[in-house]
Amino acid sequence: MNRFLLSRVLMSCLSAMLFLLAANTASAQYCDVSYGLGTSDGDYCDRFVLEGIDNTSGAGAVYNDYTAFSTLLNPGLTYEFTIYNTPEWTEYYAVWVDWNQNETFEDDENLIGLGIDNYVDIIAGGNATISFTVPVTALPGTTRLRLVCAYFPDVPMIACPDYDGGDLDYYYGEVEDYSIVIPASGPYDLAAVDLPGLVSGCGLGLQDITLEVVNVGTDPAGGFSLSYQVTDPVLGVLPAVTEDYTGADLASFESLSYTFATPADLSNSGDYTIDGWITWDLDGLDANNNTNESFTSIPSISSFPYTENFEGGSGGWTSGGVNSSWELGYPSASIIDGPPPGTPSSENSWATGLYDFYNLSEDSWVLSPCFDFSSLVVPYVKFDIWWEVYEFWDGARLEYSLDAGTTWQPIGDIGTGDNWYASGGCYSFGFDPFTGIYYPAWEGSGGGWKTAEHDLSFLAGEPQVQLRMHFKSYVFSGFQDGIAFDNFFVGDPYNNDIGVTALVDPSSGPSLGSTETVTVQLENFGLFDQSGFDVAYQLDGGTVVTETFAGTLPAGETAEFTFSTTEDLSADGDYTFVAWTELGTDEDLSNDTLTQVVSNLEPITGTDAYYIYSNVYGGPEPWFTTSSSESMDAVFGVDEWTLGFFETIDVDAVFSTATCFVWLEGGDAMANELETFLNSNYVAIQNWVASGGHLFLNSAPNEGDGMDYYFGDVSLFYAWYTNTAAPGDPGHPIFDGPFTPVGASWSGSSFGHAVVEGDADPVIIDAFDDSRVVLAEKHWGAGIAMFGGMTPTYFHSPATEATNLRNNILSYLGSCILSDIDLGLASVIAPVNGCGLGDEAVTVKIRNYGAAPQSNVPVNYQLDGGVVVSETWIGTLDPGETIEYTFASLADVSALGDHDIVAWTSFPGDTILGNDTADATITNIPVIDVYPYLEAFEAGSGGWTSGGTNSTWAQGTPAGL
């Protein structure tokens, strides 16, 4: 959790007991709810207001039956409610109404939104007002409204939180229920519910108008008329269009989508309002007969490339916002002075104050015209920019909108384009509530005019795109020039432009042969499809091999091309390949050619293991903990691995065929040292992995801005603080064992300080953002590399599960020997700890670690050192496949206390025995069913046990200090 967790836990001990004594008994509920602590630490809705309901409740019980409060809501009408939050904490809220009265709160009955948008978060002491429309299909009668309050739960929120049932993120908060009365319909009542399809857009023209109508009366409806009227931005209010409905009568609760024969002319640019209504003499309720929509028609640009230097004026760009200081002209401020160097004669640039500072508390922008990207394939944006703003507090970013400015999204992140945003974050643009990381912007000092460029291919084909330069400043900053930009370009790349982007085969590895195929990846950077062009390569400066790509390479696509000529790489050593395309009409030759070295390496044969970090502290481990070396001991054995430092190791000796496993750790204040080490030695490290070595490369920095992890385009992004992590690939072996239990999620403060980006497979992710990867894996040649941004397990919880997870990572990477026959047990998954256990089934996970399918695997288990139970799993297990097997013979664990179960495979011919065995310790907890129960602990623990992270619990006579 993102707050003062320690103080909350300390306060919670006493609060929990008081809460249990004071909790009210709730009346009948739709579903049972439970929280870990509830409202007693200040997590509650202080007041809820909806029409006739106005309840200031304060801190109540976990479940609060306020159904004595009720209000009447009419179908088809729009209402709003207000939630007043506790003054103590930021809380999340969701609200449902059971419109169909089936005693279930369904997803589409949420009044705030759908999916992950079904909640509103309100700061301490704040409030939020939400509007909603009662469905015309709402059943008449009294139904239930439910408000759920929780402190930072997973989203989407749920209407029936059950902490006792496993919804552990509902520890703080409450549930409130109210009554909603839906009046019975009269015999004659038509409701106009929507004018669908009327949204802001670019270059609108003639458009059909559709009015949606529902008969909410009890009798059939017919003989009515429908109308719409346009308020035009240029012509004003236009005459109404009225048409009679001549179709069949509408049955009760039947809907009608009526499209008028006369379309609306929306060709004028500007703001429109369209009103729609029904006219029916018999209608008994006029309040729901009308509906309207407001939207904007924006001029559109569809001719590309688009270039605007603003020398002829604004070019259709407009400025706006709060306290805007944007001006168009010649920049002549104290620092931002003069035009971009590429256009020295320029007279006009956009700037926040041409001659002075920007404003305090500014939230302003310069808005582009609409762009129709329908014809673009791989567009990009490029412009000149100069920023001189108060570092961290103020900044600017480029944003895009696909809905004519209704919503905006930032383009890119730090470093995702050329000169794209400054390292760090910007206070004024806010922060991610889950990580605490501030969103990026151009902030601080740019040091002069720079050309910024960013890919916009994710917008290709979009018919209406708007861009804006958005600037924000804080209340106390200022006395800076701000932002200036000029020479704005949007368009596609060249028409004809192809090149070689990768050497797919051969790749570095052990035992390359005498007839290695040569495969390259081609990319069409241009706009035109290309076919029938030549591709060539040269090995070690020898004969040029030229062959023809006979297929078609579409614009923006990639393809692999394999030469018919093979190469002899059987001798150990390095081979230099140069490959290129030969397209006669190519307009950009700079990206045609690729040079890459391929090495025939000796295979890994040894079993040495290393744990390496920096001696910047003088020897202690990163973060001044020993949990990482303890994991090395647990997996490899005490004194069975080697400790080294970046500054002193013999790189050739470590990354040799005698070494199977290396852990390079750069956490805390060792990130810069790790980065320096990688930059100097990445070729040797990559070749060692390609030979079959296994690498664990991990850094949770407290310095720098991330680093290149190499191995293609893998990198570490800092900072991203992962508080709760979860499996990104639940089927990965590290979640099976051999160390168990592993758990399904892990938390810490923080679990990770950085995330892995680039071409690697996610293994562990941020539980709140699955795009943020804290552990990834990549196969490289004959070896494996795992990349992490994780802190030591000392900071993680639950402690046992987190330690086992780290041990499993090391165990997974700790064996480099390949074998056709290699069967083993990943874990023992049953039985588990329980109360009053007896004869229990034993279930294990069997995994084929080898390179060939194997059938009919002998498996065994032994309970508490007793008789060995041997059985055989019948079937065929493919390489890498895992299955669950339950022994027919049960284990008698009825004796109270701990029981040790050791299980193993005994497959004939298995060449690697280190992964054959898994074990588990389970506890049979005594059941007490005689009351009253009193335990004074004079005779011992009485079956009570202690545990947890950094536990100080002890039994004895308290002696004080």
Image (cartoon, rainbow, N blue to C red):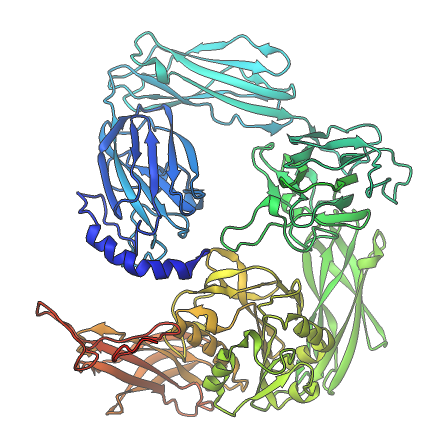
Residue 496 in the image: state x and y as whole percent.
Answer: 79, 50
Left or right: 458 as drawn, with respect to 57? right
Q: Is 270 situated above or below 767?
A: above
Residue at left 66%, top 31%?
323
Residue 18 in the image: state x and y as whole percent.
Answer: 24, 55
Residue at left 32%, top 74%?
947
- Seen from the viewer's position, the closer of residues 181 and 442 is 442
Query: Which quadrant of the structure image shows residue 214?
Result: top left
Left or right: 365 as drawn, with respect to 753? right
Q: Quadrant of the C terminus?
A: bottom left
How many marks overall? 0
- Seen from the viewer's position, the closer of residues 713 and 399 is 399
Left or right: 122 as drawn, with respect to 606? left
Q: Quadrant of the N terminus?
A: bottom left
Q: Is 751 situated above or below 937?
A: above
Report whether residue 504 is seen: yes
Query: Which quadrant of the structure image shows residue 547?
Result: bottom right
In the image, farthest residue toward the right: 345
Report whether residue 879 is seen: no
- Seen from the viewer's position, the closer of residues 594 and 920 is 920
Residue 937 in the image: state x and y as whole percent.
Answer: 18, 77
Residue at left 26%, top 26%?
182
Residue 355 in the image: state x and y as whole percent.
Answer: 81, 34
Left or right: 339 as drawn, with respect to 896? right
Q: Is 518 situated above or below 589?
A: below
- Seen from the viewer's position, the closer of residues 899 and 234 is 899
